Amino acid sequence: MCLDLLFVEQNMDYIMSEKKEIISSEHEIRVNKIKEMQEHGIQPWPSYKKVTSTCQQAKDSFVEENTEVFEIAGRLMTKREHGKTVFANIQDRSGSIQIYIKKDALEENAFENFKKFFDAGDIVWAKGTIFKTRMGEVTLKVQEVSLLSKCLYPLPEKYHGLTDT
């Protein structure tokens, strides 16, 4: 038997308790965010937002100078902040799309709320037009963004895979 595997087997209880502690602290952080959102009048589980297309439909309909507005919803997979802009990826049943959020393009406080309260795993709704970035990726330029459902636990790691416990 490999020494690393033997070490893991002998110390499984400790490893699992450490993992549970990390998950529970992440859960606690997210619950505190929900409380803060409610204090600011933001509903963590609003009732409804209209969705007009899937992520893939929005990407497929890209043509230069297209001004069509798309309303999409999906799970927030990644978020990359760059000062007054944010790039994020939303994934739904059809695929994923990159979204571009600019502070000046949103309502007052919407940009700060997105940066502060939205986490990977949350279900979000975004409305905007499609454009192509300098890197050639089809992207939704967001005019409006909203939280549809707050995720209380972090997404599982892709590297280690999913297992039943």
Image (tube, rainbow, N blue to C red):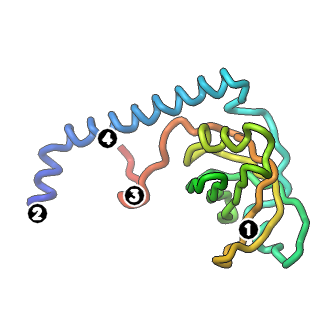
Q: What secondary structure is found at the residue carrying circle 2? A: loop
The residue positioned farthest toward the top in the image shown: 39
The answer to whether any part of residue 77 appears in the image is no
Up the image or down, 7 lies above or below 134; here it is above
Q: Are marks 3 and 1 in contact (CB under 8 Å)?
A: no
Q: What secondary structure is found at the residue carrying circle 3? A: loop
Q: What secondary structure is found at the residue carrying circle 4? A: helix
- Which residue is at a point 35% across and 58% down the rendered structure image? 160
Residue 35 pos. (x, y %): 59, 23
Determine the image quadrant of residue 6: bottom left
How far apart in space, not on screen, are marks 3 and 2 (Cα)? 21 Å
Q: Give the labeled residue for mark 2.
A: 2
- Which residue is at a point 65% across and 57% down the rendered structure image? 90
Residue 111 pos. (x, y %): 70, 44
State which tag comes first along the sequence, 1 or 4.
4
Q: Give the labeled residue for mark 3.
A: 161
How far apart in space, not on screen, are marks 4 and 2 (Cα)? 23 Å
**Amino acid residing under circle 2:** Cys
- Which residue is at a point 64% across and 28% down the rendered structure image? 37
Disc number for residue 19: 4
Q: Give the labeled residue for mark 1.
A: 56
Residue 44 pos. (x, y %): 67, 32
